[in-house]
Image (spheres, helix red, strand yellow):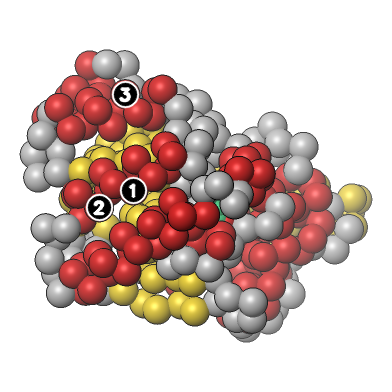
């Protein structure tokens, strides 16, 4: 084949980021935004044919998956970059899918997983694997990293109405994960509490019971503050969501920037308040109507 395309969705982490790096479970869901990679055989060094993100790691990421010579790459994405919505994971999975298609191969999950891990390591150092796993599987998953293969449990979520608010700055996942690592063992009990929230809420969600989710999101945000990955803007956005009637709100992703997600029955009130305060905000529904 002389051209090929691969696509993959981004994600949000409903509960459990950072704890998941240390073997606690987390809940993540794919979202409807995503990334498409287009590959084209042509002479010369493999590289981007059209500029995309200004990220020095991008070329190295491409070459973990593609041959060094002979491939032109284009990337299109409607995911905000570096905002905790899995933009690098979606790129990783889409790239793996496009490579398989270009080679005329059946896209085996094992190979895409291997390629996506390699790309994620370029961007994030030592990720838990949750981001590219949910990008590969779609839907929602309960994820636990182990010393061997991760435990991945598909989770059938009820429709969950969320508002996503962009804090306006990107977070650096590798730096945030390293910061938490540097604060261990002092933060270990907080990481464990994050995992405990997931264990409490996952069975409720599987029973279509959303009553515990809002309070758990609140608690999760407080624990993320405790491990040092929130910032003033993220905290102010969580407060704004709660002041406008959200049932719960938290930063989502690695923190240090990125997004806040809010669970709200009256999403318009939260959206209007976020936009009036100058932030980009939009609605997403995850779960069975996503
Ligand atoms: C990033 O989306 C989620 C983190 O838990 C890092 C990871 O799981 O690799 C912060």
Q: Nearer the viewer, residue 39 or 115?
A: 115
The residue at the point 35 percent across, 28 percent down is: 235
Residue at the (61%, 43%) spot, across then down: 183
Q: Is residue 9 above or below residue 200?
A: above
At 49% across and 79% down in the image, what residue appears?
Answer: 151
* Residue that numbered label 2 is attached to: 216
Query: Residue 214 appears at what percent x and percent y?
Result: 19, 49
Residue at which label 3 appears: 236
In the rendered image, the vertical position of residue 158 relative to residue 256, given as above or below? below
Q: Nearer the viewer, residue 51 or 221?
A: 221
Closer to the camera in the image, 217 or 190 = 190
Q: Which mark is residue 220?
A: 1
* Disc number placed over residue 169 in the picture, else none: none
Instruction: Give percent across and percent down for residue 248.
Output: 21, 43
**Residue 268: percent from left, percent from top:** 12, 33
How far apart in space, not on screen, are marks 3 and 2 (Cα)?
Answer: 18 Å
Where residue 240 sits: x, y (%)? 22, 26
How far apart are the alpha carbons under marks 3 and 1?
15 Å
**Quadrant containing the N terminus in the rendered view:** bottom right
Crowdedness near tag 1: few (<14), some (14–19) or many (≥20) residues, C-alpha within 10 Å? many
The residue carrying pointer 2 sits among few (fewer than 14), some (14 to 19) or many (20 or more) residues within 10 Å by Cα, namely many
Q: Is residue 91 left or right of residue 45?
A: left
Q: Earlier in the sequence, mark 3 or mark 1?
A: 1
Q: Secondary structure at mark 3?
A: helix
Indicate whether 290 appears above or below 208: above
Quarter of the image for residue 138 reads: bottom left
Is the residue 144 above or below the residue 285 in the image?
below
**Considering the numbered disc 1 on the image, is that residue within a helix, a strand or a loop?**
helix
Residue 82 visible: yes
Q: Is residue 71 visible?
A: no
> Closer to us: mark 3 or mark 1?
1
Q: Quadrant of the C terminus?
A: bottom left
């Amino acid at each position: 084949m002389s051209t090929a395309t691969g696509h993959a969705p981004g994600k949000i982490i409903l509960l459990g980021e950072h704890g998941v790096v240390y073997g606690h479970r987390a809940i993540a869901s794919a979202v409807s935004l995503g990334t498409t990679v287009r590959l084209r055989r042509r002479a010369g060094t493999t590289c981007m044919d059209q500029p995309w993100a200004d990220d020095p790691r991008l070329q190295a990421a491409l070459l973990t998956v593609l041959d060094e010579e002979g491939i032109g790459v284009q990337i299109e994405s409607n995911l905000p970059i570096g905002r905790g919505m899995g933009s690098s994971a979606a790129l990783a999975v889409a790239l793996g899918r496009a490579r398989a298609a270009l080679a005329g191969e059946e896209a085996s999950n094992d190979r895409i997983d291997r390629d996506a891990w390699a790309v994620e390591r370029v961007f994030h150092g030592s990720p838990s694997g949750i981001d590219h796993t949910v990008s590969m599987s779609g839907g929602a998953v309960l994820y636990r990293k182990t010393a061997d293969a991760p435990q991945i449990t598909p989770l059938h979520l009820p429709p969950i109405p969320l508002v996503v608010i962009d804090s306006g700055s990107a977070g650096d996942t590798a730096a945030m994960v390293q910061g938490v690592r540097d604060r261990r063992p002092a933060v270990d009990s907080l990481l464990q509490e994050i995992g405990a929230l997931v264990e409490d809420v996952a069975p409720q969600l599987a029973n279509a019971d959303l009553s515990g989710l809002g309070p758990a999101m609140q608690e999760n945000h407080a624990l993320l503050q405790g491990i040092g990955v929130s910032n003033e803007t993220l905290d102010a956005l969580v407060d704004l969501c709660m002041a406008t009637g959200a049932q719960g709100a938290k930063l989502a992703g690695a923190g240090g920037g990125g997004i806040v997600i809010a669970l709200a029955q009256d999403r318009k009130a939260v959206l209007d308040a976020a936009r009036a305060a100058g932030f980009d905000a939009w609605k997403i529904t995850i779960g069975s109507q996503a």
